[in-house]
Image (cartoon, helix red, strand yellow):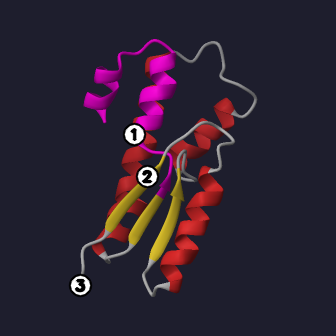
């Protein structure tokens, strides 16, 4: 079995990441490869909390560090439940957002990008 491959798409909201992720998946499937698309925040327990908290805009009481911790927990869930299993089967895991999104979004809220990278 060949090893899996991770492809992370990063970019601004509305830049077309989701559309591109599914176009890449379609091309890879046509080549006979297994390709799965995952999105952050996920639909896992923490991802749903993030979506609920940020759906109407970021709440004032949520600190940048708390937000980062939510995303870190969601990312750990994503790795355990989606990414690692996909890679272990030899699939291409296509991610709509990943670590660099945390660097940008939480970095824009004042957290040090190196701190964010280290936490990831």
Q: Residue 82, percent across and down? A: 42, 62
What residue is at 76 percent from the left and 29 percent from the top? 56
Q: Which residue is mark 1?
A: 99
Q: Quadrant of the N terminus?
A: bottom left
Q: Which mark is residue 1?
A: 3
Q: Residue furthest bottom?
A: 32
Residue at mark 2 to residue at mark 1: CA–CA distance: 9 Å
Q: Residue 22, percent across and down? A: 60, 66
In the displayed structure image, the side of residue 77 where residue 97 appears, left or right? right
Q: Secondary structure at mark 1?
A: helix
Marks 2 and 1 close (CB-CB < 8 Å): yes
Of residue 20 and residue 46, the one placed in the foreground of this image is 20
> Does 17 appear above or below 102?
below
Q: Residue 95, percent across and down? A: 48, 55
What residue is at 37 percent from the left and 70 percent from the top? 86
> Does 83 appear above or below 73?
below
Query: Which one is earlier in the sequence, the residue at label 1 or at label 3?
Result: 3
Tell me if residue 101 is in the magenta stretch. yes
């Amino acid at each position: 079995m060949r090893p899996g491959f991770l492809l992370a798409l990063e970019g601004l909201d509305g830049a077309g990441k989701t559309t591109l992720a599914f176009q890449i998946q379609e091309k890879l499937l046509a080549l006979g490869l297994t390709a799965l698309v995952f999105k952050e925040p996920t639909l896992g327990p923490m991802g749903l909390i993030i979506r609920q908290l940020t759906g109407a805009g970021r709440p004032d009481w949520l600190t940048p560090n708390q937000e980062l911790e939510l995303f870190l927990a969601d990312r750990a869930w994503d790795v355990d439940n989606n990414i690692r299993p996909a890679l272990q089967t030899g699939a291409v895991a296509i991610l709509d957002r990943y670590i660099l999104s945390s660097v940008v979004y939480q970095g824009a809220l004042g957290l040090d990008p190196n701190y964010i990278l280290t936490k990831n």
